[in-house]
Amino acid sequence: MTKDVLHVTANGSKMTKSDNRLLNGEEAKLIHLLSTGKSVTEAAGVLGIADKTARRWLERPHVREAYQEVTKSVASLVRKQIEGLQEMAIEALKESLASPSHLAKIQAIKIVLDRIDPETLKVAQTVTEAPAGPVPAELLPYVNEEELGLIEGIMERARVRKAEADEKVTPMRKTG
């Protein structure tokens, strides 16, 4: 199969390079509607034709080839856009990981870990406990930054009180 390229003629009709058969205006509209994400049924409704008619048009070699070429072009464009955003996304994740916000760090870590194949990490599946901390791991996505700050503040005050209590108890033990 030769590479099909859509050409627009002076009157607005389109044809494929491989068979030089023109797409009529309705066929071109069908391809356009499908390329914008409409289903065959939706596109047929917009065109005022039966679903069966639209499907029959798509079986025509010149229409099928034109549609495949448009689909390939759209897919290629989307792939290039995604590739262009990958570097920005990675930088944003790095910034989130370096953020003073614990919630931002947790969300960034979750995003990264959700996309890693466990086989590549060779992680033992025997870990059943949540990481040490005041909030269980499964609840962290539902705790906002302000709440997390309050919890950390409470935990820090408790640590200070414990340290003070330990200082008071230790001298008494030594004298006894």
Image: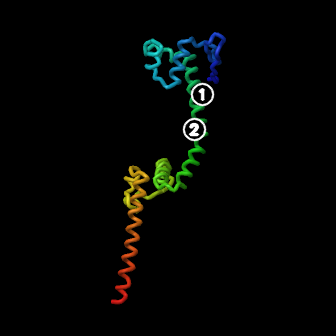
Vertical side of 144 occupied by 45: above or below: above
- Give the residue displayed 37% in from the left and 73% down from the top: 162
- Residue 17: x %, y % from top left: 65, 18
Amino acid identity at mark 1: Ser
Q: Which residue is mark 2?
A: 82
- Residue 115: x %, y % from top left: 49, 47
> For residue 161, which quarter of the picture?
bottom left
- Residue 57: x %, y % from top left: 50, 15
* Residue at the extreme right of the image, as rendered: 10
Q: Which residue is mark 1?
A: 73
Label 2 Cα neighbours within 10 Å, binned few <14 / some 14-19 / many ≥20? few
Vertical side of 123 occupied by 67: above or below: above
Amino acid identity at mark 2: Ile
Q: Is residue 25 visible?
A: yes
- Give the residue displayed 38% in from the left and 50% down from the top: 142
- Looking at the image, which is closer to me, 164 or 141? 164
Quarter of the image where the N terminus is located: top right
**Nearest-to-viewer mark from 2 and 1:** 2
The answer to which of marks 2 and 1 sits earlier in the sequence is 1
Label 2: state its secondary structure: helix
- Give the residue displayed 60% in from the left and 28% down from the top: 73
Vertical side of 14 occupied by 170: above or below: below
Question: For this view, does 73 lie left or right of residue 55?
Answer: right
